[in-house]
Each structure stands twice: as structure tokens, then as C-alpha cells.
Image: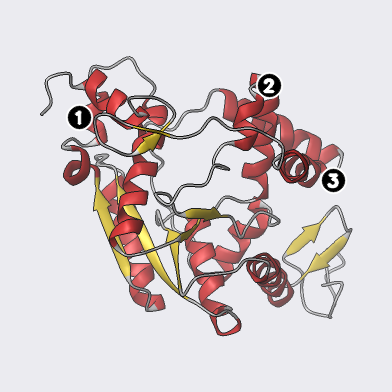
Amino acid sequence: MVDKHLKICSLCQNPAVYLDREREIHLCSDHLITSVEEQVLIYLKKIDLPPVVGIAFSGGKDSTALLKAVCRILDQLSCRVVALTVDEGIERYRQETIRAAEETCSILGVPHYIIRFQDVFGHSLDQLVSGSDRNACTICGILRRRALEILARNHSIKVIATGHNQDDHAQTALMNAISGDVRKVFSGMGESPWYARRIKPFAEVSEREVTLYALLFGLFRDLPECPYASSSLRGEVRALLYRYERNHPGSMRHAARCEEEIRDRLGRIFERDPYQTCVSCGWPGSGRVCQVCTILTNEHPNRT
């Protein structure tokens, strides 16, 4: 007897695991995997990739799914990949995620490079935020970007792929609109030989698809959540967008593409302030003293 509640893939007769509500089609595991990898391949084919591409690899589901997807389509690309991990120094969290990252890289046969806040900045994130009233996520984001750039430079990486998915893009677009800071839309668009180019192969892939992709390959791990994770504005925006997506399928994609459209059309005429050289560390930044040095000086004024 056939289970009347069992959904069948719209492209074959196998059981479905995913419903694309916007296109109103069901996909089985094979077709979901194919769909995700095709979207990643289409994205990467548009880019002039260097011989080696770095994957920003935290060990979480998004970066793990991205690393797996790229490895599976690597024979169709003219490059190889390495995994780049930043150890911020967060007790009861980072050790477990790094262990997961190391295991995944070993399984996939991908070279894995790790850099530690402690080695680069002289302090772990826990030490930097201890007794501070500053937002830990803000401090972490600024220092993690610098650490990742240093790691990339150490291994001659010119392009870094991140696991940001379509939902992340949509949330950021709405947050930028709410903040009213148009310059955030064009952040990262300035060119500098100091910085590796950032690419986002999951830009057209939803978070649900990414999660299912990781689950289907047995790569989804029940890892602890970062104790500093902010649940303020981004959490509210995420809830709002998910509600709209349920009621109006396609809302997430439209929000994500809206900002990309603005970047593409106005990026050519948007005048970004030229980089200045930090008088303290020599890295390019937006002022005489870069954000990294400002953070380190403010949190530890007696540092050497």
C-alpha cells in the first residue's frame, strides 16, 4: 500500500526530501545534491579562478557543505582548494569545531591551515573581551578578517570562498536598509593588493538546501553554538524574513538579489574613500589607525 503522504520527486520517481516552494517542485536526495552543486558550479564558472582557492573553513555546516560541494565539482574547475581556519580562542566552543574541521579535511583530503588569535594578536578573543563592554561579535569579526588575510598571504591565496548562503545575503541586505548606511552595501569593493578577493559560491543556495546537503553526506555535526553569538538585530531580521518566505515564497531570494543588483549597477560610480596606511601596523584601512590596532589598543592599552 502506497503512503498517500509520501511526496515524490518532481524529476523522477524517488522519495522527495526537499520542497522548493517558490518553484513548487519536490526534489529527491540526488536531485537536491545536483541542484546545489550546479548552482555552485555556475557561480564559480563566472570567475577567473587562480590556481589555488582558499575556503574559509570554520567546521560548521555552511563551510563544511561548501568544501564538500567544491571538492565534488573540482574536476570541472581549473584550480585546487585548501581550507583556512581561524582559531579565535573561545573556550568550550572552538576546540570542538576545529576538531570537526580537521576530521572533515582529513576525510576529503584537503590541505588545512590554521591561524590563532593568540599567535597573531597576542591575546585570545576570551582575553580581549573579558571585562569589556564592547560587542564581542564586532571585535571578533574585525580581528578574524585580519587573521584570515594573514593566513591567506602566508600561503599565497588570492581568492577566499566563504560559506555565506542566500539567507545570509538577504538578512544583511535588510539590516543595511534598516541601518540606513548605504556604504555598507559597497563594503569590500575597494581593490588592494593586500587583500584576497572574497567570493560566495552559495549566494543562490538557501540555508535549508545547504543544511540538507550537509545532512545527506553525513557531514552535519551537532556542534556547540558560539557563546558570543549575537541574537539582537540579525536574529529579529532572520525571523522576519523567514515569516515572509513562508507567506511569500521567493522573498529571501528577492531580498538577496536586490542588494547584488544595487552593487552591480551602482558599484561602478560609487566613490569609496581610498585606503590609508595604518601608522601602527602598516596595513591599509579607513583611517590613520586601522580598526584592528584600535581594538587592540583600546582593549589592552599597555600592549607592546
Marks 1 & 2, CB-CB < 8 Å contact: no
For the residue carrying disc 3, how many other residues have a C-alpha within 10 Å: few (<14), some (14-19), or many (20+)? some
**Of helix, strand and loop, which one carries label 2?**
helix
For the residue carrying disc 2, how many other residues have a C-alpha within 10 Å: few (<14), some (14-19), or many (20+)? few
Q: Which quadrant would residue 88 be assigned to in this image?
A: top left
Q: Is residue 57 left or right of residue 163?
A: left
Q: Residue tagged by mark 2?
A: 178
Q: Which mark is residue 127?
A: 1
Q: Which quadrant would residue 109 be assigned to in this image?
A: bottom left
**Of helix, strand and loop, which one carries label 1?**
helix
Count of numbered circles on the image: 3
Q: Is residue 263 something one can see in this rendering?
A: yes
Q: Amino acid at mark 1?
A: Gln
Q: Residue tagged by mark 3?
A: 249
> Which of the pair 63/248 is nearer the observer?
63
Looking at the picture, how far across and down is residue 95, in whole percent? 26, 50
